[in-house]
Amino acid sequence: DAKTTQPPSMDCAEGRAANLPCNHSTISGNEYVYWYRQIHSQGPQYIIHGLKNNETNEMASLIITEDRKSSTLILPHATLRDTAVYYCIVSDSNTGTASKLTFGTGTRLQVTL
Amino acid sequence: ETGVTQSPTHLIKTRGQQVTLRCSSQSGHNTVSWYQQALGQGPQFIFQYYREEENGRGNFPPRFSGLQFPNYSSELNVNALELDDSALYLCASSRQGRVGEKLFFGSGTQLSVL
């Protein structure tokens, strides 16, 4: 799996958009970009994933650059409950071990009043 | 629809002992994977079970073993516990073979080895 690089920490004011960057310059053509988050004392929670196109769901938006070497997770209106560690992962879902995700250390997002 | 449940939530063992952790997968999911998360680190993949067989393994020694049962629930067994095995053990379930599948994690078992 391709390696990802994320800033170790970020701050965001409540109500503002949180933009979390991720670099994955060695991503291959069949690898998806996934985002998970982990709130303290809980298991990771799926947020969103994409291959080439930008994606949006009820939680967030995922913007993938045209060359696919980087992406940005956008939480449009961050709340205190969004304080968590956010993991960017690239994984080939077409292999037999689709559930093998390689987590890094993620970005610790602190949402403040 | 029930989520992923793990038991016990906390466990204390001594070095050299053996431990069994349990996981019930989410309804409709037939694949279970296990992860180890040391303090301050991201989760590390241990192995995956599909149709009651291990079909993918991370960089963990053989003393880490598992089972998957016909109802898709799973066990993680760790023999000869070492101090470094102290970690949060996470179970995740998914539906194998679906493109772009996502994992649903339980809240984990916190294992302390003294």
Image (cartoon, coloured by chain):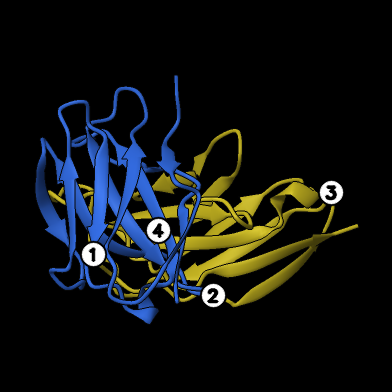
Amino acid residing under circle 2: Gly
Q: Are marks 2 and 4 in contact (CB under 8 Å)?
A: no
Q: Nearer the viewer, residue A34 or B4?
A: B4
Q: Nearer the viewer, mark 3 or mark 2?
A: 2
Which chain is indicated by disc 4? B
- Any mark on residue A28, and which? 1
Q: Residues within 10 Å of mark 1 (few under 14, many from 20)?
A: some
- Any mark on residue B40, and which? 2
Q: Point out the image quarter for the N terminus of chain A.
A: bottom left
Chain B image colour: blue
Q: Residues within 10 Å of mark 3 (few under 14, many from 20)?
A: some
Residue at 20% over, 73% down = B59
Chain A image colour: yellow
Q: Are marks 3 and 4 on the same chain?
A: no
Q: Nearer the viewer, residue A112 or B53?
A: B53
Q: Point out the image quarter for the C terminus of chain A.
A: bottom right
In the picture of the structure, the residue carrying the numbered disc 3 is A15
Amino acid residing under circle 1: Ser
Q: Is residue B114 above or below residue B64?
A: below
SS assignment at label 4:
strand
Residue B73, position as x, y percentages in the image: 26, 34
